[in-house]
Amino acid sequence: MSTRSYVVTGASTGIGRGCVDALAATGAHVWASVRADTDEQALRRDHPDGVTVLRMDVTDTDAVAAAGQRVLAGGPLTGLVNNAGVALPAPLEHIPVEVFRRQLEVNLIGQLAVTQAMLPALRKSRGQGADARIVMIGSIGGRIAAPMLGAYHASKFGMVG
């Protein structure tokens, strides 16, 4: 394999953007997933050569599958950084079930969907004798719980499990 290639979800800000910047600085090719036009434009501006933007919401089954096919067509994948996530605060007594469900969809189920979609490209890398890794970005919220974040903690404890 010549160029290392990575997928980073939640690449618009924070840890995800930091991963994109660090990986691109090593000369790796990065597939960076974002949802908004402004985030896509910022990545294209800051990394015109080493980053390919994937427009994808991790809860959109069709978009995730299409991204997996696109990455596979691009060649072997060295690593997947599952970083996308949200925190939707509310007391469990009052949180609408739809909001609780959304929290689990983004932070837990979406991570599984992306992993499944990227496995063929990761296996392609392994088939060429290279190491391929999956990194799940967690949170202290997967170890301890605080008031008003029960749905978030449920999703992060699920990730740890």
Image: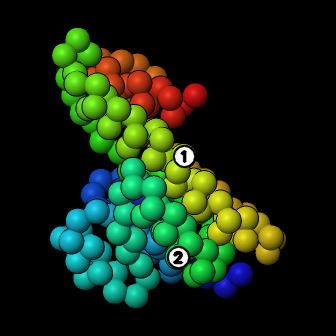
Is residue 18 in view from this perspective?
no
The amino acid type of the residue labelled 1 equals Leu
Secondary structure at numbered mark 2 = helix
For disc 2, the neighbor class at 10 Å (few under 14, some 14 to 19, many from 20) is some
> Considering only order in the chain, which callout, 2 or 1, is on the residue closer to the N terminus?
2
Which numbered disc covers residue 112? 1
Report the number of numbered marks. 2
State whether residue 60 is above or below residue 34: above
The amino acid type of the residue labelled 2 equals Arg
Task: Give the CA separation, mark 1 to mark 2.
Answer: 18 Å
Which numbered disc covers residue 94? none
* Residue beneath disc 2: 70
Quadrant in the picture for the C terminus: top right
Residue 139: x and y in percent read 41, 35
Relative placement, left or right, of 88 versus 118 is: left
Q: Where, by quadrant of the figure, is residue 71 drawn?
A: bottom right
Residue 8: x and y in percent read 45, 62
Residue 143: x and y in percent read 46, 23
Q: Residue furthest top?
A: 93
